[in-house]
Amino acid sequence: MKACEGIVMKYLDRSMPARFINSLDLDIHDMKKYKMIMLPRTSGLTEAELAQLRNYVREGGNLLVTGDALLFDEKGDERNNFSLAKELGLRYEGKLEDSVQIDIKIKNPKLKRILKEKTVQMAGMIKTSPVSGNTWVSVSSNGQEIPLVHSNVFGKGKMVYVASSASTEVMEQVGNILTGKLSLAVSDPKKQVILSRQEEQDRYILHLLGDGDYSVSIDKDFADISKGLDQYPSKGWDFKVERTKNGVQIHVSGDAQNRLLVLQK
């Protein structure tokens, strides 16, 4: 859970809540709607569950695997290699020390923004050797070059491996590359919102945690919204729902606090 907490908080800070999927429910979820599924230190999957993940990527999904994920079988016994080693394009070679000093070599320019330092401390890093695919970032430790971020195409999708679950910055940036533009974006990054779906009423509730004036863009593939139904509180602020090519843009203004919008699908 510690590995999950860091990356979930990163997305919550950007008004994008993560959805947790129990491995027992993989067969009943419509996974095609997810741009990315992340396995932070996730193991213990059965062959049937692994088959569900293979199919998700084969059909165009993106699977992000971190740290020692997929290194234990459903009984909890350690494996000699990753459960999806062939699909990841990697071979497991062992674990490095708890915290090692490493030199970074960036091969994907999109990751240069966060990996500015040439030498960093990296905890809980897994040592692998590439078999297929492309290494986006490698590190040098004791004269050896080891993949830190590795990508491998599988079917219509990608499997990407990050060798340490400790660096949420690396995980977030790799996730940004895989998902592209966020489905929900706030014009002022310091403002936060939460969009909730009410299944029975077939509507959405937009909780405006940030006060003041700003805009919220929502892609129709993420939430197909047509118009606003109601606002709380009813006075002291205004809103406007503007349809766009890709979804809607909601503009809010006024001094009222603790605001929420009821939106129609």
Image: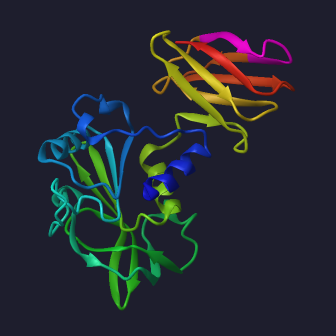
Q: Nearer the viewer, residue 103 or 205?
A: 205
Q: Nearer the viewer, residue 11 or 87?
A: 11
Between 6 and 74, the one nearer to me in the picture: 74
From this viewpoint, is residue 36 visible? yes
Q: Position of residue 105 (x, y in %)?
A: 44, 76
| Rendered location of residue 76, percent (x, y) | 19, 59
Q: Residue at x 52, y 12 (%)?
A: 265
Magenta stretch holds residue 226? no
Horizontal placement of 260 versus 149: left or right?
A: right
In which quarter of the view is residue 225 placed? top right
Q: Residue at x 19, y 68 (%)?
A: 131
Above or below, comparing residue 67 to residue 5 in the picture: below
Q: Residue furthest bottom?
A: 142
Residue 195, located in which quarter of the rendered image? top right
Residue 15 x %, y %: 60, 39
Q: How is the image coloured?
A: rainbow
Q: Quadrant of residue 188?
A: top right
Give the quarter of the figure containing the N terminus.
Answer: bottom left
Most common SS among magenta residues: strand
> Horizontally, is 63 left or right of 53 in the view?
right
Q: Residue furthest left?
A: 47
Residue depicted at x 20% and y 61%: 72
197, above or below 33, in the image = above
Q: Is residue 246 visible?
A: no
The picture places residue 122, in percent across and down from the top left corner, at: 46, 76
Residue shown at 76% from the left, 24% from the top: 252
Which residue range is magenta in the image? 227-239
